[in-house]
Amino acid sequence: MAVRGEDMAGAGTAGLLPALREGRARIDVAGQRLEGDELTGAVGALARSVAGARRVAVVARPSVATVVAVAGVLTAGAAAVPLHPTAGAHERAHVLGDARVDLVLDEPDLTGRDALPPEPPPDGTPALILYTSGSTGPPKGVVLPRRAIAASLDALAALWQWTPDDVLTHALPLSHVHGLVFGGLGPLRIGSPLVHTGRYLTPVPHATIYFGVPALWGSLGAADLTDLRPARLLVSGADRLPSAVAERVLRLSGHRILNRYAMTETLVIASPRPADLRTDLPAGSVGHPVPGMQVRLDDTDGTGGTDGPGVGGEVHVRGSGLFSGYLGRGPAVDADGWFGTGDLGEWLPDGSLRLLGRKDTDLIKSGGYRVGAGEVEDALLAHPAVLEAAVVGVPDDRLGQRVAAWIVADDPDRAGLVSFLAGRLAPYKLPQEIHVVEALPRTALGKVHKSRLAAEFRCR
């Protein structure tokens, strides 16, 4: 089977956060700012306060203190365990117990200043333990080594021409990969100023790069999108980017959104280059594998690899951005170092990758046919009245599964919608039932919570 992408690459800089160490970093979160030697000194004092600890939990509020705390823990040679600030008591107790943390930091005092201790190199030492929920069981701790973070950030800097001259702006949670690793540690490694606007994304003067998720890009008003015109790059991740959202952003901001592909376990797998956005990039493409990452597609029935178009290829990856494994569990990769993501994808004619959904929720097997939920969702979202859409397979005695859709719509005309879909989809792909709801359930990162939709259906 064909493997696409480059062989493993190492980190290009000896330290993990060189811009911080050299006094070139600046962070501004919700109006509070630290920069230069003041920022370096605050991180140094934090590192001294956690000296000797092996794992330190950080309540990841949208604040300067969170960024300083995580950077200080990493500089001290320990592993940081981010905690979402709204986590319930049960989830919090699970994370703290499973990770066996030595300390918990929640908005630590930042008045102290100290020199940075010698920093461990970007090797296999754990840097972050990020807890992520699967389809079953409690959240699992994803162990990200220093070398994976360094290699992934260097790959993004090279692909996106991300330099110290950029100003990065976002409003993402600091407890997840997108907001914390790419949006928090990235500026401390690369040297670009970070402006975190708090709970809501707002345009910032002189900002050149904005990070967001599809739900955020879809929620921005026309005035805010127009104010993004001076930027050079808008980046989306964490979920599929609906074509209707991408088209609206392009119309109002003048920018094609760069839609990259990443996971907690793998960091960035694939991404377009900014130059790709000025060409005819195929719809739904997440670009080519980034430097240091390799991708192959495996048939979902386990009968071998696939390189042609169509639903059924599970994305497998290996390379420099891969995690070390799940904390306290067995190996997560096969003997050759490949990790099965559970995502479905296909190769496009230009050699880039398009995602088709999750294997467990987005590959629907109905009456002997395979239906990709993403294709049906795109067809629904193409209707002018449909604002949001989620498609899952639900149990059916005759078909095995039938296609069911949940939509948020303005004044929906069911008959007109069915007729509209019939002109875009094969008969076996048409939803057998369409539920109109006020809102779709979403995770903290804005992903549609499809397992909850399926569970609610089973409870009927």
Image (cartoon, helix red, strand yellow):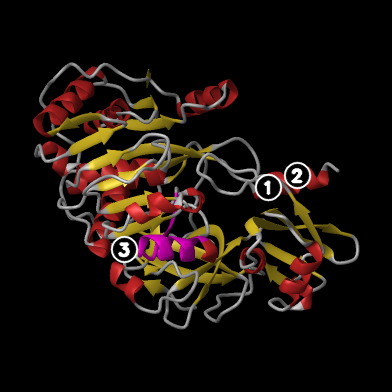
Residue 54 lies in the magenta stretch: no
- Quarter of the image with the C terminus is top right
> What amino acid is labelled 3 in the image?
Gly
Q: Secondary structure under badge 2?
A: helix
- Provide the residue span drawn in magenta: 245-263
Q: Position of residue 23 (x, y in %)?
A: 10, 37
Q: Residue furthest right?
A: 398
Quadrant in the rendering for residue 27: top left
Disc on res. 292: 3
Residue 340 falls left or right of residue 130? right
Q: Secondary structure under badge 3?
A: loop
Residue 32 falls left or right of residue 255? left
Q: Position of residue 393 (x, y in %)?
A: 75, 59
Is 342 placed above or below 111 here? below
Tell me the CA gap for discs 2 and 3.
38 Å
The reply to whether the C-beta atoms of the residues labelled 2 and 1 are less than 8 Å apart is yes
Q: Which residue is mark 1?
A: 451
Q: Closer to the N terminus: mark 2 or mark 3?
A: 3
Q: Position of residue 175 (x, y in %)?
A: 42, 36
Report the residue at 29% width, 33% height from top.
29
Looking at the picture, tell me which residue is in the foreground, 391 or 289. Answer: 391
Q: Which residue is mark 2?
A: 455
> What amino acid is labelled 2 in the image?
Ala
Residue 253 lies in the magenta stretch: yes
